[in-house]
Amino acid sequence: DIVMTQSPDSLAVSLGERATINCKSSQSVLYSSNNKNYLAWYQQKPGQPPKLLIYWASTRESGVPDRFSGSGSGTEFTLTISSLQAEDVAVYYCQQYFGPLTFGGGTKVEIK
Amino acid sequence: QVTLKESGPVLVNPTETLTLTCSVSGFSLSNTGLGVGWFRQPPGKALEWLAHIFSNDEKSYSASLKSRLTISKDTSKSQVVLTMTNMDPVDTATYYCARIIKTGTFRGYFNYWGQGTLVTVSS
Protein backbone atom coordinates (compact mmCIF):
# COMPACT_ATOMS: atom_id res chain seq x y z
CA ASP A 1 0.00 0.00 0.00
CA ILE A 2 1.00 3.62 -0.50
CA VAL A 3 2.19 5.16 2.75
CA MET A 4 1.25 8.79 3.37
CA THR A 5 3.53 10.75 5.69
CA GLN A 6 2.45 14.14 6.97
CA SER A 7 4.63 16.80 8.54
CA PRO A 8 4.73 18.37 10.96
CA ASP A 9 2.65 16.42 13.46
CA SER A 10 1.46 19.72 14.86
CA LEU A 11 2.02 23.42 14.37
CA ALA A 12 1.01 26.62 16.09
CA VAL A 13 0.42 29.67 13.94
CA SER A 14 -0.60 33.20 14.84
CA LEU A 15 -3.98 34.45 13.65
CA GLY A 16 -3.68 35.90 10.16
CA GLU A 17 -0.42 34.09 9.45
CA ARG A 18 0.22 31.32 6.94
CA ALA A 19 0.03 27.63 7.88
CA THR A 20 1.69 25.03 5.69
CA ILE A 21 1.13 21.29 5.97
CA ASN A 22 3.12 18.74 4.01
CA CYS A 23 2.15 15.30 2.78
CA LYS A 24 4.50 12.85 1.13
CA SER A 25 3.48 9.61 -0.58
CA SER A 26 5.71 6.54 -0.78
CA GLN A 27 5.04 6.34 -4.51
CA SER A 28 3.67 8.72 -7.09
CA VAL A 29 -0.08 9.34 -7.07
CA LEU A 30 0.05 11.10 -10.44
CA TYR A 31 -1.82 9.17 -13.11
CA SER A 32 -0.01 9.89 -16.36
CA SER A 33 -2.94 9.17 -18.66
CA ASN A 34 -5.01 12.08 -17.30
CA ASN A 35 -2.25 14.09 -15.55
CA LYS A 36 -4.22 14.10 -12.31
CA ASN A 37 -2.88 13.67 -8.80
CA TYR A 38 -5.13 11.34 -6.82
CA LEU A 39 -4.89 13.21 -3.54
CA ALA A 40 -7.43 14.79 -1.20
CA TRP A 41 -7.24 16.90 1.96
CA TYR A 42 -9.70 16.80 4.86
CA GLN A 43 -10.26 18.98 7.91
CA GLN A 44 -11.49 17.51 11.18
CA LYS A 45 -12.51 19.93 13.91
CA PRO A 46 -12.76 18.68 17.51
CA GLY A 47 -15.82 16.50 18.03
CA GLN A 48 -16.80 16.62 14.36
CA PRO A 49 -16.46 14.27 11.38
CA PRO A 50 -13.89 15.04 8.69
CA LYS A 51 -14.79 17.52 5.96
CA LEU A 52 -13.48 17.41 2.40
CA LEU A 53 -11.41 20.51 1.56
CA ILE A 54 -9.44 19.66 -1.58
CA TYR A 55 -9.47 16.89 -4.17
CA TRP A 56 -7.32 16.20 -7.24
CA ALA A 57 -4.58 17.79 -5.10
CA SER A 58 -5.66 21.36 -5.85
CA THR A 59 -9.42 21.54 -6.55
CA ARG A 60 -11.26 23.25 -3.75
CA GLU A 61 -14.54 21.67 -2.69
CA SER A 62 -17.60 23.87 -3.08
CA GLY A 63 -18.02 26.23 -0.13
CA VAL A 64 -14.44 25.92 1.13
CA PRO A 65 -12.90 29.36 1.76
CA ASP A 66 -10.26 30.39 -0.75
CA ARG A 67 -7.66 30.79 2.00
CA PHE A 68 -7.29 27.02 1.70
CA SER A 69 -5.20 25.85 -1.25
CA GLY A 70 -3.56 22.63 -2.30
CA SER A 71 -0.45 22.20 -4.40
CA GLY A 72 2.15 19.65 -5.39
CA SER A 73 2.48 16.70 -7.72
CA GLY A 74 3.80 13.17 -7.82
CA THR A 75 4.85 12.37 -4.27
CA GLU A 76 4.96 15.73 -2.49
CA PHE A 77 1.96 17.85 -1.64
CA THR A 78 1.13 20.88 0.45
CA LEU A 79 -2.00 22.28 2.04
CA THR A 80 -1.71 26.00 2.72
CA ILE A 81 -3.97 28.15 4.86
CA SER A 82 -3.02 31.63 3.70
CA SER A 83 -4.37 33.55 6.69
CA LEU A 84 -5.21 31.40 9.69
CA GLN A 85 -8.57 32.04 11.32
CA ALA A 86 -9.71 30.81 14.74
CA GLU A 87 -12.19 28.44 13.12
CA ASP A 88 -9.35 26.69 11.28
CA VAL A 89 -8.13 24.98 14.46
CA ALA A 90 -8.40 21.33 13.48
CA VAL A 91 -6.55 18.21 12.46
CA TYR A 92 -5.83 17.99 8.74
CA TYR A 93 -5.45 14.71 6.85
CA CYS A 94 -4.25 13.89 3.36
CA GLN A 95 -5.60 10.85 1.53
CA GLN A 96 -4.46 9.20 -1.66
CA TYR A 97 -6.90 7.42 -3.94
CA PHE A 98 -4.43 6.25 -6.55
CA GLY A 99 -4.22 2.79 -4.99
CA PRO A 100 -5.95 1.11 -2.05
CA LEU A 101 -7.05 4.07 0.01
CA THR A 102 -4.64 5.34 2.65
CA PHE A 103 -4.53 8.41 4.86
CA GLY A 104 -1.77 10.39 6.45
CA GLY A 105 -1.43 10.45 10.23
CA GLY A 106 -2.81 13.96 10.55
CA THR A 107 -1.43 17.41 11.39
CA LYS A 108 -2.88 19.35 14.28
CA VAL A 109 -3.14 23.11 13.73
CA GLU A 110 -3.41 25.38 16.75
CA ILE A 111 -3.33 29.11 17.43
CA LYS A 112 -0.06 30.51 18.72
CA GLN B 1 -29.54 17.55 0.88
CA VAL B 2 -27.16 14.65 1.33
CA THR B 3 -27.08 13.06 4.78
CA LEU B 4 -25.60 9.90 6.23
CA LYS B 5 -26.37 8.49 9.66
CA GLU B 6 -24.63 5.63 11.44
CA SER B 7 -26.47 3.31 13.79
CA GLY B 8 -25.52 0.27 15.78
CA PRO B 9 -24.67 -0.91 19.28
CA VAL B 10 -22.92 1.37 21.72
CA LEU B 11 -21.34 -1.53 23.59
CA VAL B 12 -20.04 -4.81 22.21
CA ASN B 13 -18.57 -7.77 24.07
CA PRO B 14 -15.14 -9.06 23.10
CA THR B 15 -15.27 -11.80 20.44
CA GLU B 16 -18.72 -10.69 19.28
CA THR B 17 -19.58 -9.44 15.80
CA LEU B 18 -20.30 -5.74 15.30
CA THR B 19 -23.00 -4.76 12.82
CA LEU B 20 -23.24 -1.11 11.79
CA THR B 21 -25.78 0.45 9.46
CA CYS B 22 -25.35 3.63 7.44
CA SER B 23 -28.67 5.14 6.34
CA VAL B 24 -28.34 7.64 3.52
CA SER B 25 -30.62 10.28 2.05
CA GLY B 26 -30.32 12.86 -0.70
CA PHE B 27 -28.79 10.39 -3.14
CA SER B 28 -29.39 6.83 -4.27
CA LEU B 29 -27.07 3.89 -3.71
CA SER B 30 -27.77 3.04 -7.36
CA ASN B 31 -26.31 6.35 -8.62
CA THR B 32 -23.44 5.60 -10.99
CA GLY B 33 -20.16 6.91 -9.65
CA LEU B 34 -21.20 7.00 -6.02
CA GLY B 35 -20.80 4.71 -3.07
CA VAL B 36 -20.41 4.59 0.71
CA GLY B 37 -17.38 3.89 2.82
CA TRP B 38 -16.68 3.16 6.47
CA PHE B 39 -13.95 4.53 8.72
CA ARG B 40 -13.01 4.37 12.35
CA GLN B 41 -11.12 6.62 14.72
CA PRO B 42 -9.98 5.45 18.16
CA PRO B 43 -10.15 8.21 20.80
CA GLY B 44 -7.39 10.75 20.16
CA LYS B 45 -6.00 8.84 17.20
CA ALA B 46 -5.95 9.12 13.42
CA LEU B 47 -8.63 8.20 10.95
CA GLU B 48 -8.55 4.67 9.49
CA TRP B 49 -10.36 3.63 6.31
CA LEU B 50 -12.10 0.24 6.62
CA ALA B 51 -14.08 -0.51 3.46
CA HIS B 52 -16.28 0.94 0.77
CA ILE B 53 -18.86 -0.20 -1.75
CA PHE B 54 -19.94 1.36 -5.03
CA SER B 55 -23.28 1.38 -6.81
CA ASN B 56 -22.11 -1.43 -9.12
CA ASP B 57 -21.42 -3.53 -5.99
CA GLU B 58 -17.65 -3.11 -6.37
CA LYS B 59 -16.16 -3.56 -2.87
CA SER B 60 -12.81 -2.74 -1.36
CA TYR B 61 -11.42 -3.59 2.08
CA SER B 62 -8.52 -2.51 4.24
CA ALA B 63 -5.85 -5.18 3.81
CA SER B 64 -5.15 -5.34 7.54
CA LEU B 65 -8.80 -5.98 8.46
CA LYS B 66 -10.10 -7.72 5.35
CA SER B 67 -10.56 -11.09 7.04
CA ARG B 68 -12.89 -9.53 9.63
CA LEU B 69 -14.98 -7.17 7.47
CA THR B 70 -18.00 -7.54 5.24
CA ILE B 71 -19.72 -4.63 3.52
CA SER B 72 -23.06 -4.81 1.74
CA LYS B 73 -25.82 -2.53 0.58
CA ASP B 74 -29.59 -2.57 0.37
CA THR B 75 -30.43 -0.04 -2.32
CA SER B 76 -34.17 -0.20 -1.68
CA LYS B 77 -33.62 0.74 1.97
CA SER B 78 -30.82 3.25 1.22
CA GLN B 79 -28.60 1.44 3.69
CA VAL B 80 -25.04 0.18 3.76
CA VAL B 81 -24.12 -2.41 6.38
CA LEU B 82 -20.67 -3.17 7.75
CA THR B 83 -19.96 -6.21 9.88
CA MET B 84 -16.73 -6.72 11.81
CA THR B 85 -16.14 -10.07 13.46
CA ASN B 86 -14.19 -11.01 16.58
CA MET B 87 -14.30 -7.60 18.21
CA ASP B 88 -11.53 -6.67 20.66
CA PRO B 89 -11.12 -3.75 23.06
CA VAL B 90 -8.60 -2.22 20.62
CA ASP B 91 -11.51 -1.86 18.18
CA THR B 92 -13.08 0.75 20.47
CA ALA B 93 -13.55 3.79 18.25
CA THR B 94 -15.93 6.21 16.63
CA TYR B 95 -17.14 4.66 13.40
CA TYR B 96 -18.05 6.93 10.48
CA CYS B 97 -19.69 6.34 7.14
CA ALA B 98 -19.12 8.68 4.22
CA ARG B 99 -20.17 9.07 0.59
CA ILE B 100 -17.46 8.26 -1.92
CA ILE B 101 -17.05 9.77 -5.35
CA LYS B 102 -15.73 7.11 -7.71
CA THR B 103 -12.57 8.13 -9.55
CA GLY B 104 -11.52 4.73 -10.82
CA THR B 105 -11.80 1.04 -10.11
CA PHE B 106 -12.09 0.64 -6.33
CA ARG B 107 -10.99 4.25 -5.77
CA GLY B 108 -12.36 7.64 -4.78
CA TYR B 109 -12.57 10.45 -2.27
CA PHE B 110 -15.22 11.20 0.34
CA ASN B 111 -17.37 14.32 0.15
CA TYR B 112 -20.11 13.81 2.75
CA TRP B 113 -19.74 12.28 6.19
CA GLY B 114 -22.01 11.06 8.95
CA GLN B 115 -21.59 12.31 12.51
CA GLY B 116 -20.19 9.00 13.67
CA THR B 117 -21.11 6.50 16.35
CA LEU B 118 -18.93 5.54 19.29
CA VAL B 119 -18.55 1.80 19.78
CA THR B 120 -16.96 0.51 22.97
CA VAL B 121 -15.70 -3.05 23.19
CA SER B 122 -15.74 -4.28 26.75
CA SER B 123 -17.08 -7.10 28.87
Image (spheres, coloured by chain):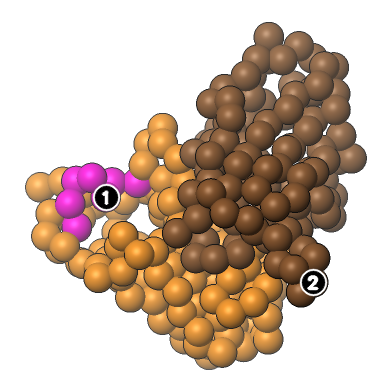
Q: Magenta span has A85?
A: no
Instruction: Give how far across and how far down residue A78 sits, in percent.
Output: 73, 38
Whether residue A53 sits left or right of residue A104 in the image: it is right
The image quadrant where one finds the C terminus of chain A is top right
Q: Chain B is drawn in which colour?
A: orange
Q: Which amino acid does label 1 sit on?
A: Asp
> What residue would you read off at disc 2?
A34
Q: In which quarter of the image is residue B4?
A: bottom right
Whether residue B48 sits left or right of residue A11 in the image: it is left
Front residue of B5 and A77:
A77
Q: How crowded is mark 2: few (under 14 residues within 10 Å), some or many (20 or more)?
A: few
Disc 1 versus disc 2: distance between alpha carbons? 39 Å
Q: How crowded is mark 1: few (under 14 residues within 10 Å), some or many (20 or more)?
A: some
Q: Is residue B62 visible?
A: yes
Whether residue A25 sits left or right of residue A74 in the image: it is left
Q: Is residue A51 placed above or below A81 in the rendered structure?
A: below
Residue at 35%, 64% in the rendered image? B63
Q: Which amino acid does label 2 sit on?
A: Asn
Front residue of B115 and B96:
B96
**Residue farthest to the right?**
A66
Q: Magenta span has B88?
A: yes
Instruction: Give how far across and how far down residue A92 sits, in percent.
Output: 62, 37
Q: Mark 1 lies on which chain?
A: B
Residue at 75%, 50% in the rendered image? A73
Q: What SS does tag 1 mark? A: helix
Q: What SS does tag 2 mark? A: loop
Q: In which quarter of the image is residue B17?
A: bottom left
Q: Which region is colored magenta?
A: B87-93
